[in-house]
Image (tube, grey):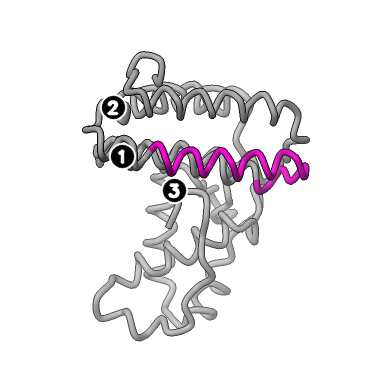
């Protein structure tokens, strides 16, 4: 699953319990609802409803919510329950700064891949830029947003650093909370397409500094 996407919950939940903890299954289900915007920033997560819908006790639901709280996606309020977090401007700014650093590192590492792997990645990036261009021309901000993130995720995965991928996933998911409540108007999409085309070209040429 890509960091900014979530599939619909699997109806055959019981069939996978033997191989996966209930807490993880519940966490993935609630995470999916958050990423799809079904539970919005600032809204309370109803533990009894989650438990009833999945046919589990409230114990794994609480376990799942504790894990989501540790990742910074939800917050527990005393005597009130657990709520999807609303990010402040300063935190959002800090997350974008961190994401920029991670993107730069991934860009440098990906540009240093052996030629066959690097050229295969460059082809994938060029295809992604093409989809961004199509979205920009049709003023489809949501499609552009997803493809932009896909472009960078391709380089993050190519860097082959599990810690980088995990950290990047957490940053993008938290920024997604802000994205769901503050939709962009699509300003500057064409300029951004040009920037991403340059990144892909630098990576194809193996220019690590320029790619970063």
Per the image, label 1 sits on a secondary structure element best described as helix
**Residue identifier under label 2:** 109
Q: CA distance from mark 3 to mark 2?
A: 31 Å
Q: Which mark is residue 158?
A: 1
Residue at horizontal 40 percent and vertical 36 percent from the top: 122
- Circles 1 and 2, Cβ within 8 Å, touching? The answer is yes
**Element marked by disc 2:** helix
Q: Earlier in the sequence, mark 1 or mark 3?
A: 3
Does 209 appear above or below 32?
above
Query: Which quadrant is home to the C terminus?
Result: top left
Mark 3 Cα shell of 10 Å, populated few (<14), some (14-19), many (≥20): some
Q: Is residue 23 left or right of residue 30?
A: left
Image quadrant occupied by the N terminus: bottom left
Q: Give the number of the mark in front: 1 or 3.
A: 1
Pick the front one: 211 or 39 = 211
Q: Is residue 82 above or below residue 171?
A: below
Asked if marks 3 and 2 touch (Cβ < 8 Å), the reply is no
Foreground of the two, 173 or 126: 126
User: How many angstroms separate mark 1 from mark 2 (CA)?
Assistant: 8 Å
Residue 189 falls in which quadrant of the image? top right
């Amino acid at each position: 699953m890509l960091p900014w996407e979530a599939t619909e919950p699997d109806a055959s939940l019981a069939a996978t319990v033997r191989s996966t903890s209930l807490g993880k299954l519940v966490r993935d289900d609630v995470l999916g609802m958050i990423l799809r915007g079904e539970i919005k920033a600032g809204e309370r997560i109803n533990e009894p409803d989650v438990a009833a819908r999945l046919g589990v006790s409230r114990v794994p639901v609480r376990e799942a919510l504790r894990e989501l709280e540790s990742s910074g996606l939800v917050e527990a309020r005393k005597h009130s329950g657990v709520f999807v977090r609303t990010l402040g401007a300063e935190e959002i700014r800090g997350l974008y700064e961190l994401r920029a650093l991670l993107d730069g590192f991934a860009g440098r590492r990906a540009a240093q891949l052996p030629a066959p792997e690097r050229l295969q990645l460059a082809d994938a990036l060029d295809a992604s830029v093409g989809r961004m261009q199509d979205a920009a021309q049709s003023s489809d901000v949501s499609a552009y947003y997803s493809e932009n993130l896909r472009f960078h995720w391709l380089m993050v995965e190519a860097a082959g650093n599990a810690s980088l991928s995990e950290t990047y996933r957490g940053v993008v998911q938290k920024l997604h909370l802000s994205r769901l409540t503050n939709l962009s108007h699509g300003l500057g999409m064409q300029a951004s397409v040009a920037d991403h085309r340059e990144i892909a070209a630098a990576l194809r040429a193996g220019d690590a500094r320029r790619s970063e």
